[in-house]
Image (cartoon, grey):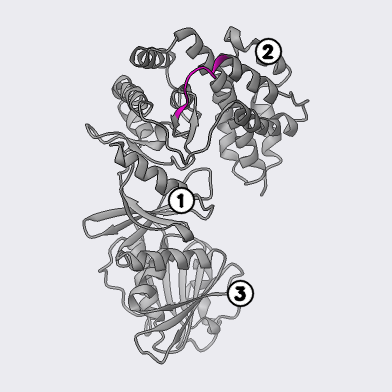
């Protein structure tokens, strides 16, 4: 089953650039279609996008049969035109057979191949009566979504931009940087359909002066948006390169949260109260289940402790995935915010825990203590009760993360998150040491720490 797109020259190039952003070495694209269908135009746009120069000279290989290129990452790109090939045995002389294993190969007239590689992608171009248009049939996994991205970019006026992938998160969301001359934007692709929540939260934040990206274009029904590019300076990387900035950065984080918490919560975000926290922490059961340990029933305890220690303060807006890899350092400008579409109404300590008990990087204990004290001095909350609630929310959040990392490894084949488990478990243990959490600490006594042996047992069950 293929995805079909009616495209002019501009959209054809946009589809090619979107495909160029997706392919890894070892993939082959079969470009099918008669003379004049636009196969070379498609290949030229693809190669220019990979090279990062949309004006690069890319001649047709009609007479040379093969042209080779290198992209900035060192990937070889082979562009072959097999129209003049008289026998498939000539492929070995060209070296194309060998190139298919570790290069990206674009092959026009692929019917001359004896047997295309089994993982080849097919792009078939067919002329239409309107000479300015062609039909593009894409036959490969993810083709429909790729076509939607290309069409959206074309309608926003960014069809001529170069597309490069940006690092994603643990979800199915994807991000791409678009570069058009001296302008940049970020294409957000969210097939999970949380785009409405992202757009609503973005507007709420920007209306109040927070550093969320401006919305440039949107198609919420398709799960696509084009937003302001806030840059590459993720706070985690900035602090790694300049540790002296750590105290300043975490003071800025505390001040941001204190300011955020002054605003009445938006009515469109869900409530993360005691019962909801209890339900969420049930995901932790995946961790002990996986290593064949009895699962403690901790949800009821979390709800009870929340009622005792965290229900007295009015809930505030919590961005939820609030940590150094979702914050962008912009100098004196407000911290850039990303990945907040899952915002909730929660206890004021929730985002503070998220930032200070980071699963991905160590935050010094003195920085954590100072940040909590700074927040308390700004807000005037009762220190004893706030610290008890902080420990509870830290326990709940980190226990849930243990379950999420287990699921990512086993269900989604992403074992790299297992290496973060010891840090997360250390957060759990430190939180459980608070006297208010003694019932929860007792319930978790039999659960083993995620040492090397435990993580290897989980890794052995990862999806291939």
Can you give x and y, in whole percent of width and height, for residue 151 in the image? 41, 68
Q: Are marks 2 and 3 in contact (CB under 8 Å)?
A: no
* 160 with respect to 411 (left or right): left
Q: Which mark is residue 1?
A: 3
Can residue 104 be seen here?
Answer: no
Magenta includes 314?
yes
Which residue corresponds to mark 1? Answer: 196
First in residue order: circle 1 vs circle 3 = 3
Q: Which mark is residue 367?
A: none
Could you tell me which secondary element the residue under label 3 belongs to?
loop
Q: Quadrant of residue 303?
A: top right
Can you give x and y, in whole percent of width and height, for residue 228 in the image? 30, 49
Q: Residue at x 46, y 46 (%)?
A: 197
Q: Residues within 10 Å of mark 3 (few under 14, many from 20)?
A: few
Can residue 72 be seen here?
Answer: yes
Which residue corresponds to mark 2? Answer: 439
């Amino acid at each position: 089953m293929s995805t079909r797109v009616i495209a002019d020259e501009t959209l054809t190039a946009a589809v090619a650039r979107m495909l160029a952003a997706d392919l890894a070495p070892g993939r082959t694209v079969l470009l099918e279609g008669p003379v004049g269908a636009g196969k070379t135009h498609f290949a030229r746009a693809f190669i220019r996008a990979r090279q990062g120069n949309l004006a690069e000279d890319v001649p047709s290989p009609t007479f040379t049969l093969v042209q080779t290129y290198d992209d900035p990452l060192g990937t070889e790109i082979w562009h072959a035109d097999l129209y003049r090939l008289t026998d498939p045995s000539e492929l070995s002389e060209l070296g194309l057979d060998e190139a298919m294993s570790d290069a990206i190969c674009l092959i026009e007239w692929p019917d001359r191949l004896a047997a295309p590689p089994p993982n080849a992608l097919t792009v078939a171009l067919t002329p239409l009566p309107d000479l300015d248009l062609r039909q593009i049939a894409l036959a490969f996994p993810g083709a429909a979504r790729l076509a939607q991205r290309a069409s959206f970019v074309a309608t926003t006026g960014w069809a001529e931009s170069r597309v490069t992938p940006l690092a994603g998160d643990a979800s199915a969301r994807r991000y791409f940087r678009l570069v058009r001359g001296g302008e940049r934007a970020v294409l957000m692709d969210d097939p999970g359909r949380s785009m409405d929540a992202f757009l609503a939260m973005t507007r709420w934040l920007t209306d109040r002066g927070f550093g969320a990206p401006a919305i440039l274009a949107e198609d919420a029904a398709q799960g696509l948006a084009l937003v302001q590019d806030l840059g590459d300076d993720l706070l985690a990387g900035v602090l790694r390169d300049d540790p002296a900035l750590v105290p300043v950065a975490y003071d800025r984080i505390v001040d941001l949260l204190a300011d955020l918490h002054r605003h009445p919560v938006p009515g469109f975000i869900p409530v993360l109260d005691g019962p909801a926290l209890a339900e969420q922490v049930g995901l932790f059961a995946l961790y002990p289940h996986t290593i064949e340990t009895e699962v403690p029933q901790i949800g009821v305890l979390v709800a009870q402790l929340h009622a005792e220690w965290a229900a007295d303060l009015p809930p505030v807006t919590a961005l939820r995935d609030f940590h150094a890899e979702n914050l962008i350092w912009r100098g004196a400008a407000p911290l850039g915010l990303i990945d907040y579409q899952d915002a909730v109404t929660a206890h004021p300590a929730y985002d503070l825990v998220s930032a200070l008990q980071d699963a991905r990087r160590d935050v010094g204990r003195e920085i954590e203590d100072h940040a909590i004290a700074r927040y308390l001095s700004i807000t005037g909350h009762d220190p004893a009760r706030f610290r008890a609630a902080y420990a509870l929310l830290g326990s709940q959040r980190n226990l849930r993360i243990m379950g999420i990392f287990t699921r990512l490894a086993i269900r989604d084949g992403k074992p790299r998150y297992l290496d973060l488990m010891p840090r997360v478990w250390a957060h759990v243990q430190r939180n459980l040491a608070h006297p208010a959490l003694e019932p929860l600490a007792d319930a978790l006594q039999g659960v083993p720490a995620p040492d090397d042996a435990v993580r290897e047992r989980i890794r052995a069950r990862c999806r291939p």
